[in-house]
Amino acid sequence: MERFTISLSQDLARAFDDLIQRKGYQNRSEAVRDILRDMLSAESLARDEAPFCVAALSYVFNHHARDLAERLTSIQHEHHDLVLSTMHVHLDHDNCLETVMLRGPTTEVQAFANALMAEPQVRHGRLNLVPVDVDTHAHSHSQSHSHGHSHETDDTVHYRHVHSRPRN
């Protein structure tokens, strides 16, 4: 762990300490680390230097719109390699909220989100994208089988993978 010192005015230090308390950080170091991670992630996205990401795409749509639910489902099936999970919530008689959890190459995730949000009658869409580093090499598990899949290597996000086996 590398240490460094910064100087802050009393007003800025007090405001920072208030923020730390409101957000529930244990100390200034944890808060500074999160701020730096956030800034570095935003910078890598702005410079198109984030090749892989996880994301949550949330949008509201009118479920009475002709064939819209089927089109949305079809788009998700066409991109099954990106879609991890979808949650569907009925907001009222006319409106539904869906949140789609995504994982994959950043440009593909962004293109998927843009295409889905561009569908007529989809509104209030928002993509929350988090760049991550992944290790995509093959390896073995104690279950005595070898295969390749992604593991995230950033310390802020962790994936859980489950191995399914045919029942006898």
Image: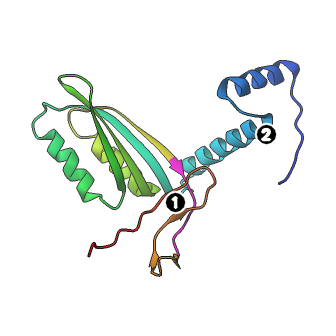
Instruction: Please state the horizontal and vertical placement of residue 85, each as a whole percent of the image.
Output: 34, 50
> Whole-percent x and y of residue 86?
32, 46
Q: Residue 33's x, y, as percent?
A: 73, 43
**Residue drawn at point x = 76 percent, y = 25 percent:** 16
User: Which stretch appears magenta?
Assistant: 130-137
- In the image shown, does 100 or 38 lie closer to the viewer? 100
Residue 29: mark: 2
Q: Which residue lies furthest to the front in this view?
A: 168
Q: Is residue 136 magenta?
A: yes
* Among numbered discs 1 and 2, the one appearing first in the sequence: 2
> Which labelled disc corresponds to residue 51?
1
Left/right of residue 96 with respect to residue 83 in the rendered view: left
Q: How crowded is mark 2: few (under 14 residues within 10 Å), some or many (20 or more)?
A: few
Residue at 60 percent of width and 61 percent of height: 153
Q: Compare residues 163 and 90 and report the one nearer the observer.
A: 163
* Residue 40 shown in magenta: no
Look at the picture and state if 160 lies above or below 140.
above
Query: Does 41 sit left or right of 81 as displayed?
Result: right
Q: Give the camera-side residue of 163 and 157.
A: 163
